[in-house]
Image (tube, rainbow, N blue to C red):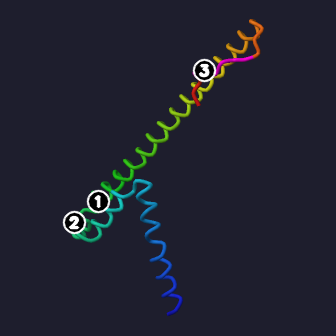
C-alpha cells in the first residue's frame, strides 16, 4: 500500500515535467487528440480504429516534419554563419597583407562584425 502511494506521488510529481517536455517537442496537438479520442470520442474511436490511428499517425508525422524543417533551417543558418566568418577572415587577411606591403604595423578592424 505504501509503495503504491509513493509511486502515485512520483507520477504526480513528474507529470507536469512530462507535459512541459511534450509541449516543447510540439507534441501538444497529438496529445490532445489522444485525450479526446479516449474520452469524448471513445465510441467513434472504437467504431473506426483504422481512421483514428491514421489521424494520429498523420499528426505525429506532421510533428516529425516540423522537426526536420527546423533542423534544416538551423543547419542553413550555421552554414551562413560559417561563410560570413570565412569572408571576414579573408578580408582581415587581405588588410594584413596590404598593411605589410605598405610597411604599417596597425590594421583597421572598425567595420568587422562580431
Q: Position of residue 58 (x, y in %)?
A: 34, 51
Residue interval drawn in magenta: 106-111
Q: Is residue 46 depicted above or below 2 in this figure?
A: above
Q: Which residue is mark 3?
A: 87
39, 27: nearer the viewer? 27
Q: Is residue 36 depicted above or below 55 in this figure?
A: below
Q: Which residue is mark 1?
A: 52
Q: Which residue is mark 2?
A: 44
**Residue 75 magenta:** no
Q: Earlier in the sequence, mark 2 or mark 1?
A: 2
Disc 1: CA contacts within 10 A as few (<14), some (14-19) or many (>=20): some
Side of 11 where 109 appears, left or right: right
The residue lying at 25 percent from left, 70 percent from top is 42
Q: Position of residue 17 (x, y in %)?
A: 47, 67
Q: Earlier in the sequence, mark 2 or mark 3?
A: 2
C-alpha separation, residue under disc 1 versus residue under disc 3:
53 Å
The residue lying at 73 percent from left, 17 percent from top is 106
Q: Earlier in the sequence, mark 1 or mark 3?
A: 1
Disc 2: CA contacts within 10 A as few (<14), some (14-19) or many (>=20): few
Label at residue 68:
none
Amino acid at each position: 500500500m505504501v509503495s503504491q502511494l509513493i509511486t502515485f506521488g512520483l507520477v504526480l510529481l513528474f507529470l507536469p515535467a512530462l507535459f512541459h517536455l511534450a509541449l516543447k517537442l510540439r507534441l501538444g496537438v497529438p496529445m490532445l487528440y489522444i485525450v479526446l479520442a479516449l474520452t469524448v470520442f471513445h465510441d467513434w474511436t472504437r467504431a473506426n480504429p483504422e481512421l483514428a490511428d491514421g489521424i494520429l499517425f498523420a499528426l505525429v508525422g506532421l510533428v516529425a516534419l516540423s522537426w526536420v524543417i527546423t533542423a534544416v533551417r538551423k543547419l542553413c543558418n550555421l552554414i551562413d554563419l560559417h561563410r560570413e566568418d570565412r569572408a571576414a577572415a579573408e578580408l582581415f587577411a587581405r588588410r594584413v597583407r596590404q598593411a605589410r606591403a605598405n610597411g604599417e604595423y596597425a590594421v583597421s578592424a572598425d567595420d568587422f562584425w562580431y
